[in-house]
Image (cartoon, rainbow, N blue to C red):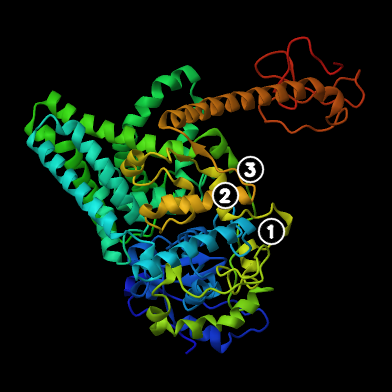
Amino acid sequence: AESRASPSSSPSSQRPRHPPLAVFAGAMSSKAEAHATATYSRRALSVVHGYLYDLEPFERHHPGGRQMLCYAYGRDATELVESVHSLADRGQLLRVLARYRIDPAAVHPDDLPPPSEAPPFAWSNASLFGVDVRKEVRAYFEAEATRRGVSLRQATKATPAKWCLMLALLAAYAASAAAWFAGCWWSLAALPACGSAACFNIFHDASHGALSTRPWLNALGTTMGFSIAAPYNWAHQHVIGHHAYTNMPDHDPDYQHVNRWRRVPTALAAVLLPLVWAVAVPLGLHVLAPARLLLTGSYNYTVASIPLTFSDRCKYVARWALLLALAYLWPFAVMTPLKALVWSGIPAAISSLTFMLITQIAHLTPDAATAAEGSGACPRSLVSTASPPGRAADLSSNFGSASSLSSRTSSAASSCSDLDIAEGARPGPGAGVTAGSTLSNPHDHDEAAPDAGPSASAAAPLECFFEHQVRTANDYCVGSRAVFLFSGGLNFQVAHHMFPTVNHCHLRAVSAIVADCAERHGLRYMTLGSLAEGVGKHWDLVKQLRSRELDLNKGAWEMAATAAVLAPTAVGPAVGSAVERPPAFAAPITDPGSPGGPALRASPSSAMPVIAGTPARAGTGASR
């Protein structure tokens, strides 16, 4: 019972477990010997709240299917797992995960997922706002489930009316695509319009598992968005990166996009902004991003790639080539070069402009974009399940040993069938949890140590995930049914980011709950009245980024100039003391008229002295 194998793992993906170091004795314990003979899946290792998991046996039982589970492989997936299960009973979530927990000491160091550099959220100790908003949204779906006679999980997915709308959008998309392939001129406008509406209503929801409780339907829906991005690329860009780390510099791929404007003069940015929006999808998402993902193993240098086998990589390249052929290359084989350029370029540019308009104003405005800057906390460290420190030991004792729990995978299907929004959560004693809450983690106190990290007390307080979404997202055009239909409900960004697995047909009602709860707790709920206002706010951010960059450069120059002037009298080594210098420079000289002044050396390019390696201005000396 102490050993555990992954029967579905291929031999090439398995590595013998390395035994942990014997700290108190020279010989390994019997448990360590068992680990040394067991195997684990190298590609399916994941870290959640500082614990290491081998999730490959869970693929057969995961309610969201294998595709969604693979997003957690090879990374610290704490924020990803928690944000996807934001309506779940955290106690049940942790109990299911505990079955697949393994000891990091039994894993080869090269196979361990790299630590996350992103600041964690306070998942086990949510704020009063976080507790209340989860409780009220869950109560809404409980009432919906009772009214419709379905399960609570089914109540969060697409309604029959939404399915009818999606079928109508698919029919319109298919008709416009057929006309485009047939060479009808009207399709140049109809194809991007119908394609964008279909993608926002089907593809986006499917990528979050929000279409249906059946994983195969969600997987099928992700193939409908090729006019925006391939499913594998979109998973990195949107699900793994943007939703887990919204507007966090160096961690959110969407935030990285806007940083380009820091280095562009404002007048030039006014000309380039619409051009960049027009090529963002065809050049950025369809060409550069996939190539960078294959060559560097990261998406936009912020999100590590999902581990791929050679077979998976070949399939990915084949699908990428098919996407490029269908979207851009086939007109050049049957049309004149000029018409082919128009035929492939105009629909792509319109789709790209539409995509950027819908997405950029939702987060990249001055108030929303700067809300996450400066947020930081210590990253989590990996916790050993062999001897968990502090309160982590209580969690291990509640769930049993990692190896004994992992042997109970046969009961996984029955206990996690409603995992993403489970029934029967009990109130927990964590900080900020109100009496009678039905959404708190029964083991919040057990998760305190791994959730906060080993040195959280010395770092900034952890931020509540739900409050973070209110501060970093904008709703827009909330009264427009046309925008709601065309954007697939993406104009209700705050509610969508809090509960990504909820279908967009419910977001109008959910956003009203979130806004009311935010008002009661004194949080500013940001709403833009129109698309034009959103574009104006985005342009304000572009100008602000440029101004901030200029201020930083000016401040750095002023600090360097001040240091060069003040250094002779304020700081520096004593007369005659040694000064570190490159071998090519002359020997240091000193100014005897300035006791305690710095040593000077001759500059290789001029007769002017330099102080601490910085060229001085003419006429300045040690006395000044």
* Disc with the residue nearer the chain's start (3 vs 1): 3
Residue at point 47%, 27% (across, down):
536
Left or right position of 504 against 399: left
Q: On the image, which quarter does residue 271 sit in? A: top left
- Report the front residue among 66 and 145: 145
Q: SS at mark 3?
A: loop
Q: Amino acid at mark 2?
A: His
Q: Amino acid at mark 3?
A: Gly
Pointer 1: residues within 10 angstroms few (<14), some, or many (20+)? some
Vertical side of 439 occupied by 278: above or below: above
Vertical side of 343 occupied by 452: above or below: below
Residue at label 2? 468
Residue at point 41%, 67% (across, down):
44
Residue at point 45%, 60% (across, down):
84
Give me the disc on residue 242.
Answer: none
Pointer 2: residues within 10 angstroms few (<14), some, or many (20+)? many
Give me the disc on residue 374.
Answer: 3
Q: CA distance from mark 2 to mark 3?
A: 13 Å
The x and y percentages for residue 407 are 44, 85
- Report the front residue among 460 and 578: 460
Residue at label 1? 456
Left or right position of 83 against 345: right
Q: Amino acid at mark 1?
A: Ala
Instruction: Mark 2 vs mark 1: give the one in front.
Output: 2
- Can I make out residue 77 in this image? no
- Can I make out residue 435 in this image? yes
